[in-house]
């Protein structure tokens, strides 16, 4: 197994681990935005750049997808690596000036603001990291959103920019969005969940007993499909929220116990 | 008479199954040509075609068809000759006149004269010959023209000689003999060894040693290996690959078959940009012909080796010239690059070992196999072997396509071959390597051309574009052009390229509008460094080169814009003013009438005057003045 030296800390990792895996093992923090272990690393945000020294030469590589195949020496805190990460962060701050999540991460990196004028183009406050599209495709299996446009005009959208029929309003994209741009909105009046800014909506299941909102219907459908339970049976179980169901179960157990007595 | 249609009659009725058969066919084709045949070769390459050479070719063909029975006249449309500046080019081979006769700037009305005088009677039409601008002497043969004299042609050897739609032409000039040699006398290892020995480095821009790439791909594990020809030529001002694809498509196919045999691949792809419809067509015809004769398909030339090629048309994205983006596009996905930490020779197209080379690289292979790696490595410099095709464009006298041995100096290319700067203006710089390259100023004109030499100057070899700029070109504006080009062509995947390039453009826009601020140069340099360090692919990594190199060599010009709000080249509108030279002004009143803001005043027949406070510097008066009395100051 290859040995990785990160800022002087040596760790041994399995073949093909990434530098980021090794850093985590070594307890060294590397900022990331477009990385999530649940999906393929595409290394497009470039925030996790580290310096790799090899044969007397140094190069910057993205730690989230650089496969460790032999012993390597990595520097996270070198001036060159820090400067590059700072540069990337400054550009992102100009792109998503209103994101508190991004500001917080910048602060953690020791960056206060950006010298660049803010970008006024298409999708402000989206850093185009693509985590949402990857989660939607690879984890949820819906591919309801994707990139459209090219270069500076790129943006994340549903097909034809219309509310998507493929979207199950599961909210996974909102959960992984590192800058808080994707949001789940609950419409009390219609009992729907909306994934903003994609305009996709779905009806929420409501607990028959307490009226609490649960998952959206299409999510329930999909889960049902995956666990292979008869829909009617599922309906019976899904009528109540977990809490009410627990109560009901407890009650029925108590009744059985009472009857036994 | 040779018809140049797409479905030319192929002489051999069956597949060529051995080198002996190929040799026999080649011999037969050569002998078949009557020595008294007069050949007219009309360049129908892109430059000449744009000037109407297709019509000229038609006229010659009709004239040849209508000529007396006993006259054997062969009219051929051939690929680019190189001297596009003097197109359309027509070359006549007449048995009675030794050598060939090179006519330039031929127009439709000249066809009848050339046909009557030269083709039929063997007399030379002096008027259409090339005239040496220094000696004033008329030159009959292309070999004597300074433009061609010092060139050495390997990749372009048959360009302009053969009909690109005729496999017979290619075979008659020794085509596919390298393939025959490789398949019968060499094993894959020998071939790779020969290519390694040749020292050939990738002609697409990266300059990676071709032999080493082939070996890595051969050694890589995979059930199916692929070879790809990258014909997605997209640099502004570059048309090298196009000239080969349209002028000699079989040379690419032959190179690819040899490469596939050496690597162990059975499927190849040619990725051509769809903006080159003629390239697509020519390659298609060539592949079909190669199939008919058995140079492609099952059991090539009687060997157990099988290989096929498919053409894929690119959708117009510049970034698809990048190997990983090209492969993504080939797979039907969005053409976006990926990190190359895992090399494409191991995991490329469809995750299989893939060897990708540029058009010119493939076109060079057959010569290396035929003449040997040692021969190839005897040409060029220590680290850059062989020859390289360049496109000489911009403010240069002889715009065109040249192939020179590596190590020739920029001065020799620009002055001896290119004839120097247009209108004898002062040379300012030459941009090599397209948008990824840099501007090289006059003090480095004696640098020998080679991969490492150009990189040292902050530029790069690239695929071979050479854009010459003169004193009238503003370098800031020039750099801005490239940054704007890259802004439009960035795929948008990674942050530095997508966000950094527009930020650079924003600063450059300000500078050229006279709104530059102190510290702008430092900001540009910081962004440039970030792009080079942090971008995902070569497009972003090299994007800042035009800016960095111009700041490095022409800092004073940037400072004139920023501090003095003045454009020394007088190109940036608003950063210079228009004045009327009283002695040259006749008082005709044209400028006065055309000025949209009434900034010009003056009596009839008296010198006029521009009121600088009202003038918006639109330049209308400058364009309209028939006496050149208005100057930029």
Image (cartoon, rainbow, N blue to C red):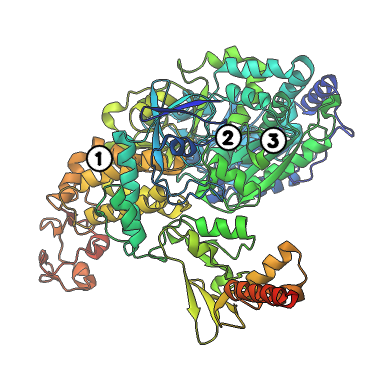
At which x and y percent is residue B604?
13, 71
Mark found first going from the N terminus, 2 or 3: 3
- Name the mark on residue B488: none
Q: Is residue B542 visible?
A: no
**Which of A91 and B375 lies nearest the eye of the viewer?**
A91
Q: Which residue is mark 2?
A: B358
Mark 2 and mark 3: Cα distance apart in space: 14 Å
Q: Is residue B30 visible?
A: yes
Mark found first going from the N terminus, 3 or 1: 3
> Do the CB atoms of the residues marked 2 and 3 lie less than 8 Å apart?
no
How busy is the neighbourhood of tag 1: few (under 14 within 10 Å), some, or many (20 plus)? many
Q: Which residue is mark 1?
A: B551
Q: Which residue is mark 3?
A: B226
**Which of A252 and B590 lies nearest the eye of the viewer?**
A252
Judged from the image, the secondary structure of the residue bearing numbered disc 1 is: helix
Residue furthest front as drawn: A261
Residue furthest right as drawn: B13
Judged from the image, the secondary structure of the residue bearing numbered disc 3 is: strand
Question: As drawn, is B327 to the left or to the right of B11?
Answer: left
Mark 3 and mark 1: Cα distance apart in space: 42 Å
Judged from the image, the secondary structure of the residue bearing numbered disc 2 is: strand
**Which of B188 and B78 lies nearest the eye of the viewer?**
B188
Image point (16%, 52%), residue name: B517
């Amino acid at each position: 197994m290859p040995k990785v030296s990160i800022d002087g800390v040596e760790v041994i990792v399995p073949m093909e681990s990434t530098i980021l895996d090794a850093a985590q093992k070594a307890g060294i923090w590397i900022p990331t935005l477009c990385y999530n272990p649940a999906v393929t690393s595409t290394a497009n945000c470039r925030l996790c750049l580290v310096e790799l020294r090899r044969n007397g030469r140094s190069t910057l590589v993205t730690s989230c997808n650089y496969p460790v195949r032999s012993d390597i020496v990595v520097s996270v805190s070198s001036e060159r690596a820090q400067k590059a990460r700072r540069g990337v962060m400054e550009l992102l701050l100009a792109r998503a000036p209103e994101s508190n999540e991004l500001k917080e991460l910048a602060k953690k990196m020791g960056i206060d603001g950006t010298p660049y004028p803010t970008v006024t183009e298409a999708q402000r406050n989206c850093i185009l990291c693509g985590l949402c599209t990857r989660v939607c495709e690879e984890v949820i299996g819906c591919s309801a959103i994707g990139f459209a446009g090219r270069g500076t005009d790129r943006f994340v959208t549903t097909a034809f920019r219309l509310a998507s029929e493929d979207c199950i309003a599961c909210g996974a994209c909102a959960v992984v969005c590192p800058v808080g741009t994707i949001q789940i909105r609950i419409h009390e009046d219609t009992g729907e969940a909306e994934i903003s800014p994609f305009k996709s909506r779905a009806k929420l299941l409501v607990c028959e007993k307490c009226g609490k909102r649960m998952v959206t219907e299409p999510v329930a459908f999909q889960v049902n499909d995956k666990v292979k339970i008869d829909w009617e049976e599922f309906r019976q179980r899904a009528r109540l929220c977990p809490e009410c169901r627990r109560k009901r179960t407890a009650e029925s157990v108590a009744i059985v116990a009472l009857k036994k007595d | 008479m040779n018809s140049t249609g797409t479905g030319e009659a192929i002489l051999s009725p069956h597949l060529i199954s051995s080198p002996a058969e190929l040799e026999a066919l080649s011999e037969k084709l050569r002998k078949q040509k009557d020595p008294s045949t007069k050949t007219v070769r009309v360049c129908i390459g892109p430059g000449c075609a744009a000037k109407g050479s297709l019509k000229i070719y038609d006229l010659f063909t009709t004239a040849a068809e209508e000529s007396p029975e006993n006259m054997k006249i062969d009219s051929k449309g051939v690929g680019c000759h190189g001297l596009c500046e003097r197109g359309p080019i027509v070359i006549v081979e007449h048995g009675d006149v030794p050598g060939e006769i090179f006519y330039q700037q031929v127009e439709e009305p000249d066809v009848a004269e050339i046909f009557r005088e030269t083709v039929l009677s063997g007399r030379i039409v002096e008027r259409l010959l090339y005239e040496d601008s220094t000696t004033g002497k008329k030159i009959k043969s292309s070999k004597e023209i300074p433009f061609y004299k010092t060139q050495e042609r390997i990749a372009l050897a048959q360009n302009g000689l053969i009909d690109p739609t005729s496999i017979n032409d290619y075979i008659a000039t020794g085509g596919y003999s390298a393939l025959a040699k490789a398949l019968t006398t060499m094993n894959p290892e020998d071939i790779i060894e020969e290519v390694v020995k040749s020292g050939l480095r990738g002609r697409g821009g990266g300059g990676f040693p071709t032999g080493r790439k082939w070996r890595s791909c051969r050694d890589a594990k995979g059930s199916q290996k692929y070879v790809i020809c990258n014909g997605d030529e997209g640099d502004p001002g570059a048309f090298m690959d196009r000239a080969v694809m349209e002028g000699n498509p079989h040379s690419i196919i032959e190179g690819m078959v040899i490469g596939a045999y050496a690597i162990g691949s059975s499927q190849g792809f040619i990725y051509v940009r769809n903006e080159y419809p003629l390239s697509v067509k020519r390659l298609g015809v060539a592949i079909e012909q190669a199939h008919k004769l058995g140079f492609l398909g099952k059991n090539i030339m009687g060997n157990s080796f099988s290989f096929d090629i498919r053409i894929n048309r690119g959708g117009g994205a510049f970034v698809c010239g990048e190997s990983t983006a090209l492969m993504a596009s080939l797979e039907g996905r969005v053409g976006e690059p990926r990190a190359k930490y895992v090399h494409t020779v191991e995991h490329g197209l469809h995750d299989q070992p893939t060897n990708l080379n540029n058009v010119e690289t493939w076109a060079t292979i057959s010569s290396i196999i035929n003449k040997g790696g040692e021969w190839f490595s005897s040409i060029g410099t220590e680290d850059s072997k062989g020859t390289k095709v360049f496109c000489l464009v911009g403010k240069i006298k002889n715009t065109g396509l040249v192939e020179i041995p590596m190590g020739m100096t920029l001065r020799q290319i620009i002055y001896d071959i290119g004839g120097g700067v247009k209108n004898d203006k002062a040379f300012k710089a030459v941009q090599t390597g397209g948008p990824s390259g840099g501007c090289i100023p006059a003090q480095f004109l004696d640098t020998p051309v080679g991969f490492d030499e150009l990189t040292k100057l902050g530029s790069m070899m690239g695929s071979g574009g050479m854009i010459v700029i003169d004193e009238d070109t503003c370098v800031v504006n020039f750099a801005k052009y490239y940054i704007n080009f890259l802004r439009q062509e960035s795929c948008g995947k990674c942050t530095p390229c997508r966000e950094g390039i527009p930020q650079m453009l924003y600063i450059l826009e300000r500078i050229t509008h006279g709104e530059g601020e102190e510290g702008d140069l430092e900001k540009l340099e910081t962004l440039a460094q970030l792009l080079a360090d942090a971008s995902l692919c070569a497009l972003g990594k090299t994007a800042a080169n035009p800016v960095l190199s111009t700041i490095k060599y022409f800092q004073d010009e940037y400072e004139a814009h920023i501090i003095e709000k003045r454009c020394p080249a007088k190109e940036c509108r608003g950063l210079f003013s228009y004045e009327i030279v009283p002695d040259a002004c006749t008082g005709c009143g044209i400028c006065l009438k055309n000025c949209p803001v009434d900034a010009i005043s003056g009596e009839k027949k008296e010198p006029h005057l521009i009121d600088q406070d009202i003038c918006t510097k639109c330049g209308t008066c400058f364009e309209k003045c028939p006496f050149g009395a208005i100057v930029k100051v």
